[in-house]
Amino acid sequence: MQSIDNQGYTNCYFPIRCSKIYSDVCYGCIELKNVTLPPFLKSISDDVFCGCINLEKLNFPETLTKCSSSFYGTNINVIDFSKCHFNNNWRGRVELSFHPLNMKELRLPQGVETVCVSGEGKLYVPSDVKVIREWHGEKCKEFHFESPTPPEMEYKLNNCTIYIPKGSTTAYFAKFGETNKYIEE
């Protein structure tokens, strides 16, 4: 797929058999509102949709195994990778780094072990996640953990609402402290 220039395009359709979207394809397309991702897509490279300020939603196919795009400068409120299964990188673990500007909710994919993410919305964390390295600005105030064992975090959670599996309050309280609210689901 060639890069599309910013000539007022509002829709983008990728070929049905497209398996990889390369860097900067739609970068800065400020009029872009609708994107149809192909059903067999496996990889999205760096900054594919950055600066697409009118882009509000993307539906990611279950076949997606890698995404290194940050979605910075879009108006996407919900990033949902929960049905995707990301592959291991060369170090034997999966890492995911995200910096969406207006994110309200991020649902992580299966297979991710280490997360470096920023935003101010809700973070849904599958049981595969072992480490959350950074949360720039520490604006997130709501976490939804799937595992009864809390992940390692490189920063302190303060005044957050933490949703956890039944019976795991003691483990999370011991890890994250008394300044947070714990709700068992």
Image (cartoon, rainbow, N blue to C red):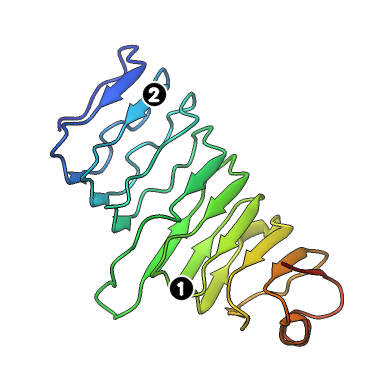
Give the side of residue 6 with respect to residue 101, left or right. left
Mark 1 lies on a secondary structure that is: strand
For image coordinates 16% across by 34% down, the residue present is 16
Q: Residues within 10 Å of mark 1 (few under 14, many from 20)?
A: many
Three-letter amino acid code of the residue under disc 2: Asn
Q: CA distance from mark 1 to mark 2?
A: 30 Å
Give the side of residue 15 with respect to residue 62, left or right. left
For image coordinates 49% across by 27% down, the residue present is 53
Q: Nearer the viewer, residue 141 or 72?
A: 141
Asked if residue 95 is positioned above or below residue 76 in the image, the reply reads: below
Residue 134 quadrant? bottom right
Q: Which residue is mark 1?
A: 114
Q: Give the label on residue 34, or none.
A: 2
Image quarter of the C terminus: bottom right
Image quarter of the N terminus: top left
Residue 177 quadrant? bottom right
